[in-house]
Image (cartoon, rainbow, N blue to C red):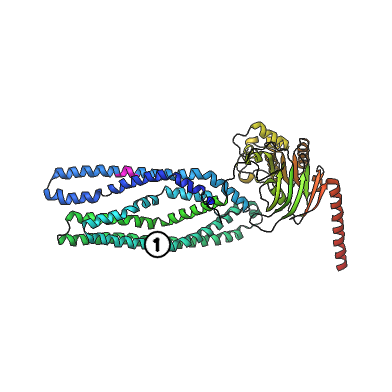
């Protein structure tokens, strides 16, 4: 069970921070609703004072006052509307960095399969606060006052208005109970459809090459149609209830008008009060009717707020760690268990190893043995389930985030570049990056000449995912990005998978240079040729360490074991024959 302090998330604090603005909005709403009585009072005075006295000056004076009051009403309504827009912007602006960071952590924890887009939820809240529905909420408390005014004119009029308000409130409760659950189901289906479309956009080349478009369209269309069908049913229901509420309000206004005429015939009501009563009762019913019309937006905003609240609670702000001395690059893993995000089955089991600064570790093993998982754990991209990962004897979770950014460079197995220039990608989109550091990283990765050959050199736009480059070019620019900032620890996951002979030579030169400068390198590799520069070798099989030690010793043992396995397989095959 979460502690009470964990239930004080950023969303609540930001909403509390805008309370003064909400109080000011409430003050404007007070004046606006008082000024809304201008019309009924004007009608009463015209019909009951100006017309019986046949006084033109009285009529002119009342008209001037009425125009002035309505002008103030319009000005205050405009100010209130703009104030609500700015309060919505303030909430979004104060939370957007926090929500973005939390979404990034959650997506990493979920393995890139996050559900709702929290930044989109934040926009839903912002647009709701800047829309017409919050103004309705400020006007709703005035409904009893309008009913009281109708009651003062005559009790029957007050009772009629009260009956209409009760009916509309019941319609609103029914609307909420019928649409809220359906809205959640629609959001779930739409999220899944959006996720499929995102996957399609990311893998368009494979889809086109393998002619998978028709099948994927069927999958996306099924989810999209189901979401659209549910959305249509929800909107039809909301529209029906909204139409019902509007019809009841218009009917009740006419009923009040007829009732007022009946009372006027009996001498219980003045002629001016007949129209005034209809206007007042209509105004009393307006907030309930408008709330029903905007209920869908309100439900969406509340749901978005709950998702953001849950996201921020599940991903609290990490305390700022003390800045430690610049790391040398010693790495230690002790009894580490690790699993893919969202999974309980460990992919690494009781892994322990140690590296001194300047050593090169080659990690080998069959596919699915946990090599890439090890790389992600060492970088801190995935958290260990148990055990410790330490850099210079400090747990990786304790390192200051900015300092860790300068400490660890990472080249993933699948290199993903961002929509931007080569310069921006190498600099990791740091706005204060120096040109000399960018060029140094490119030279260190032996990618400088490659970049100079691009159409606009370092200012070449790469397109989404680096689509303007070949696989080998992306890998070398990704390596330059890993080397940016002169990190002490460099993790390379299959860095030679897309390289030709020249690229392999350049990679070996990069590793030699890193080693000579005392940098610690963890190299995940399948090709034996990439292991020539390794000081130590780690052999993984099914997530467990089967061998760890000096390169020559481990490779000799590993080669013998592989030979024995192959011989055993051949013997089994021949015996079956």
Where does the image place residue 161, in percent across and percent down from the top left?
28, 60
Any magenta on residue 74?
Answer: yes
- Residue at point 41% right, 57% down? 295
Residue at 63% x, 58% y is 212
Secondary element under disc 1, as helix, strand or loop, is: helix
Task: List the residue tagged with mark 1.
Answer: 173
| Residue at the spot 78% in from the left edge and 36% down from the top edge | 516
Quarter that holds the N terminus: bottom right
Q: Quadrant of residue 571?
A: bottom right
Spot occupied by residue 57 in the image (x, y as percentages of width and height) = 15, 42
Indicate whether residue 568 is drawn in magenta. no
Please give left or right for residue 365 compared with residue 382 in the image: right
| 208 or 304, nearer to the observer | 304
Quadrant of residue 151 in the image?
Answer: bottom left
Q: Residue furthest top?
A: 436
Percent x, y of residue 215: 61, 60
Residue sitting nearer the eye, 496 or 352: 352
Front position in the image: 561 or 153: 153
Residue reaching furthest to the front:
4
Magenta segment: 73-77
Question: In this rendering, does residue 494 appear at all?
Answer: no
- Residue furthest left in the image: 53
Give the main secondary structure, helix, strand or loop, of the magenta stretch.
helix
Q: Is residue 177 left or right of residue 202?
A: left
Which quarter shows the C terminus? bottom right
The picture places residue 18, in percent across and down from the top left corner, at 43, 44
Report the number of discs.
Answer: 1
């Amino acid at each position: 069970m979460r502690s009470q302090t964990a239930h004080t998330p950023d969303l609540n604090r930001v909403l509390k921070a805008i309370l003064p603005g909400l109080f000011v909005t409430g003050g404007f709403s007070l004046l606006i609703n008082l000024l809304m009585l201008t019309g009924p009072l004007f009608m009463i005075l015209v019909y009951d004072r100006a017309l019986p006295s046949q006084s033109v000056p009285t009529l002119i004076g009342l008209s001037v006052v009425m125009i002035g009051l309505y002008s103030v009403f319009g000005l205050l309504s405009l100010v209130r509307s703009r104030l609500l827009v700015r309060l919505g912007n303030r909430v979004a602006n104060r939370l957007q960095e926090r929500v973005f960071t939390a979404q990034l952590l959650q997506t990493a924890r979920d393995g890139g399969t996050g559900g709702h887009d929290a930044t989109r939820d934040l926009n839903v809240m912002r647009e709701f606060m800047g829309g017409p529905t919050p103004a309705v909420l400020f006007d709703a408390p005035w409904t009893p006052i309008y009913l009281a005014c109708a009651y003062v004119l005559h009790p029957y009029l007050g009772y009629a208005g009260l009956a209409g308000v009760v009916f509309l409130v019941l319609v609103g409760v029914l609307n909420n109970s019928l649409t809220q659950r359906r809205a959640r189901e629609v959001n779930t289906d739409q999220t899944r459809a959006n996720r499929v479309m995102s996957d399609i956009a990311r893998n368009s080349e494979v889809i086109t090459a393998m002619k998978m478009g028709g099948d994927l369209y069927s999958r996306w269309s099924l989810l999209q149609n189901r979401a659209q069908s549910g959305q249509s049913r929800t909107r039809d229901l909301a529209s029906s209830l909204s139409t019902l509420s509007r019809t009841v309000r218009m009917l009740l206004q006419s009923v009040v008008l007829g009732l007022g005429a009946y009372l006027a015939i009996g001498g219980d009501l003045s002629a001016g009060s007949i129209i005034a009563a209809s206007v007042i009762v209509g105004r009393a019913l307006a907030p309930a009717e408008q709330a029903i019309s905007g209920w869908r937006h309100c439900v969406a905003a509340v749901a978005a707020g709950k998702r953001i609240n849950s996201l921020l609670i599940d991903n609290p702000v990490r305390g700022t760690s003390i800045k430690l001395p610049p790391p040398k690059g010693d790495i230690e893993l002790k009894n580490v268990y690790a699993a893919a995000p969202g999974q309980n089955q460990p992919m690494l089991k009781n892994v322990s190893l140690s590296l001194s600064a300047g050593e090169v570790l080659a990690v080998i093993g069959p596919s699915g043995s946990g090599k890439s998982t090890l790389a992600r754990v060492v970088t801190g991209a995935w958290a260990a389930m148990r055990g410790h990962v330490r850099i210079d004897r400090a747990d990786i979770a304790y390192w200051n985030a900015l300092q860790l950014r300068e400490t660890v460079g990472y080249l993933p197995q699948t290199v993903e570049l961002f929509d931007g220039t080569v310069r921006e990608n190498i600099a990791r989109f740091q706005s204060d990056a120096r040109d000399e550091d960018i060029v140094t990283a490119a030279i260190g990765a032996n990618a400088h000449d490659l970049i100079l050959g691009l159409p606009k050199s370092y200012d070449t736009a790469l397109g989404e995912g680096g689509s303007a480059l070949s696989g080998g070019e992306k890998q070398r620019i990704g390596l330059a990005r890993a080397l940016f900032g002169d990190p002490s620890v460099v993790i390379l996951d299959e860095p030679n998978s897309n390289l030709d002979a020249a690229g392999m030579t350049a990679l070996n030169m990069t590793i030699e240079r890193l080693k000579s400068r005392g940098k610690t390198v963890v190299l995940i590799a399948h090709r034996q040729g990439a292991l020539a520069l390794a000081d130590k070798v780690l052999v993984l099989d099914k997530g467990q360490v089967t061998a760890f030690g000096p390169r020559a010793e481990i490779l000799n043992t590993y080669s013998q074991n592989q030979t024995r396995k192959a011989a055993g397989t051949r013997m089994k095959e021949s015996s079956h024959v």
